[in-house]
Amino acid sequence: MAAILTSLRNTVIAGVILTVIMILLVTQVTDADFAIDQSYQAFFVRWLHVLSGIMWIGLLWYLNFVQIPNMPNIPDEQKPAIGKVIAPAVLFWFRWAALATIVTGLLLAHLQGYLLEAIQLGMSDGVAKHTAIGIGMWLGAIMAFNVWFVIWPNQKKALGIVDADADTKAASARTAMLFSRTNTLLSIPMLYAMVAAQNIY
């Protein structure tokens, strides 16, 4: 077991295998039929969307609830470990999870047949579900834009990944933090809209 849990790669592989075993078990001991049809394809894309979203919002909340508030408590001699090792790794997964969430979300809306209605915020058909999911989609799109075109370019300067003078680094760190906080603010109604669209409307 230690060989599995001490390696992230092995842990993820074991999680996928356990998921397959669970699917097989459920279909064998219940009357559930398993078929890779349109319904399952949409479900699978939704599952990928949720996994990506958990990675993205989990890292967003880690940055805002844990890392940023605790940076002043870290001794100066230890801060380079955050800036040179942890933050770049977090930002790698953060930005690619944002993209994966957007792509899988758009694909899911297409598979479910409401992509255009949601993009139009339900104004074309007056369906509450399309309005709710559309609001969530637009908030997610704004957040992903912030990640790729504001937070990441400014973090590259702040972390010294690209050359910048001290004043530029400080200004970039503040800009990245403010847009990260903006995304935290937007994540709350975004998640509400997504869950409401699936459970209320």
Image: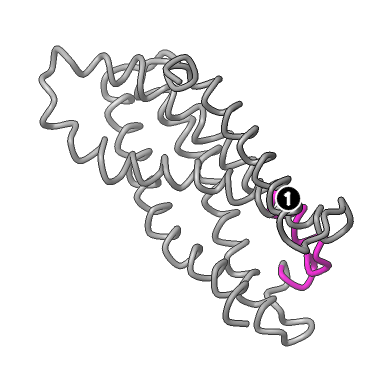
Q: Residue at x 50, y 41 (%)?
A: 55
Q: Percent x, y for residue 102?
A: 65, 49
Most distant residue in the bottom direction: 126
Q: Residue at x 14, y 12 (%)?
A: 77
Task: Give 38 or 185, whichever is nearer the viewer.
Answer: 38
Helix, strand or loop at label 1? It is helix
Image quadrant in which you'd find residue 15: top right
Quarter of the image that includes the C terminus: bottom right
* Image height of 172 relative to 189, above or below: above
Q: What is the magenta segment's predominant secondary structure? A: helix
Q: Residue at x 71, y 79 (%)?
A: 122
* Image height of 192 relative to 3, above or below: below
Quarter of the image that includes the N terminus: top left
* Image height of 88 relative to 142, above or below: above
Q: Is residue 44 magenta?
A: no
Residue corresponding to mark 1: 45
Give the crowd class for mark 1: few <14, some 14-19, many >=20 residues within 10 Å. Answer: some
Horizontal placement of 115 versus 38: left or right?
A: left
Image quadrant in which you'd find residue 82: top left
Q: Percent x, y for residue 183?
A: 43, 52
Horizontal placement of 94 versus 116: left or right?
A: left
Mark 1 residue type: Val
Q: Residue at x 36, y 46 (%)?
A: 61
Q: Percent x, y for residue 20?
A: 69, 39
Horizontal placement of 190 versus 43: left or right?
A: left
Q: Is residue 106 magenta?
A: yes
* Image height of 194 relative to 55, above or below: below
Q: Percent x, y for residue 156?
A: 44, 23
Numbered range of the magenta stretch:
104-118
